[in-house]
Amino acid sequence: MFVGIGFILIGLLAIVDIVLTIIAAMKASEGISYKYPLSITFIKPRI
């Protein structure tokens, strides 16, 4: 049972990763800085 939940979770995370990568690529092509959700900011960006 737990193995099945793990496979489903891995699949969902892979889909989310692909979608967020596409969104980031579209923003980058427009020249807009994109911050991934739930990412930790180690260095503050210069504004």
Image (cartoon, rainbow, N blue to C red):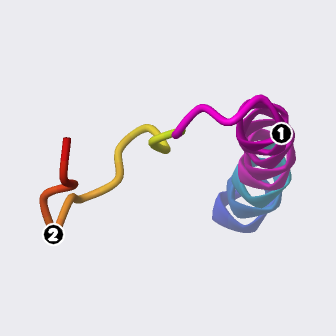
Q: State the quadrant of the N terminus.
A: bottom right
Q: State the quadrant of the C terminus.
A: top left
Q: Do the CB atoms of the residues marked 2 and 1 lie less than 8 Å apart?
A: no
Secondary structure found at label 1: helix
Q: Residues within 10 Å of mark 2 (few under 14, many from 20)?
A: few
Residue 31 position, x and y percent, is 68, 36
Q: Is 3 placed left or right of 42 in the picture?
A: right
Nearest the eye: 32 or 7: 32
Q: Residues within 10 Å of mark 1 (few under 14, many from 20)?
A: few
Q: CA distance from mark 2 to mark 1?
A: 23 Å
- Secondary structure, magenta segment, majority class: helix
Image quadrant where residue 28 sits: top right
Count of labels in the image:
2
The amino acid type found where label 1 is placed reads Ser
Residue at screen point 75% across, 60% down: 10
The amino acid type found where label 2 is placed reads Ile
Q: Is residue 44 above or below residue 31?
A: below
Q: Which circle marks residue 29 in the picture?
A: 1
Residue 6 position, x and y percent, is 69, 61
Residue at screen point 49% across, 44% down: 36
Secondary structure found at label 2: loop
Confirm whether the magenta stretch covers residue 29.
yes
The residue that label 2 is drawn on is 43
Residue 13 position, x and y percent, is 71, 50
Q: Is 13 placed left or right of 33 in the picture?
A: right
Nearest the eye: 4 or 38: 38
Q: Magenta residues?
A: 13-33
Going from the N terminus, do you reach mark 2 or mark 1 first? 1
Confirm whether the magenta stretch covers residue 15.
yes
